[in-house]
Amino acid sequence: FQWSGAVAMDPDWLRSRVRVLRRKAERTEPHRLELVFGGFRLEEKSLDLLLQWLLMPDSLVQQALSVRAPLCCWADFRGTGLGDEELEKLLKCLRSLELKVERLYLAANNITQRSTAVLKDFLHNADGLRTLDISSNSLD
């Protein structure tokens, strides 16, 4: 069940992939943020637009955070073409939103060993992380 209230100028590709869900018992309070981008090629420009949108004061995410913080987050970025720089930007954004990231799917991207320190720092501060998928990257 998607929480209503998207900014009118949001691009359709973005609005359809960012969802704030509620539990049936808590109809007015948001429960989880889902970022569903698996298989959608995120070029640098579209990733920057996504991150700016997530941080906008009147975005759907900010509306949900104003009601319930921290908000649980499931983030699917499998096969989106993320490289080391893009991963760093994404993790910095998720951290700045103070989301409780429970599931983070980063498989089949262009992440290399250069991201090891960024991932380690994120993992150190991700208390609620239950699932991390970094398979099919170049982390050897």
Image (cartoon, rainbow, N blue to C red):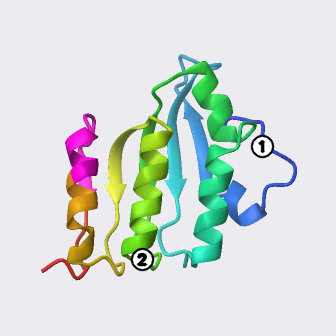
> Which residue is painted at 78% across and 37% down in the image?
5
Q: Where, by quadrant of the figure, is residue 139 drawn?
A: bottom left
Q: Where, by quadrant of the figure, is residue 7 drawn?
A: top right
Tell me which amino acid carries mark 1.
Ala
Mark found first going from the N terminus, 2 or 1: 1
Percent from the top left, x then y, of residue 107?
31, 71
Front residue (pair 65, 27):
65
Front residue (pair 15, 114):
114
Percent from the top left, x then y, of residue 44?
57, 76
Is residue 72 visible in the rendered image? The answer is yes
**Highlighted magenta segment, given as a residue range:** 121-132
Judge whether 63 appears above or below 61 on screen: above
Judge whether 13 appears above or below 81 on screen: above
Name the mark on residue 6. 1
Name the mark on residue 79. 2
Percent from the top left, x then y, of residue 27?
62, 20
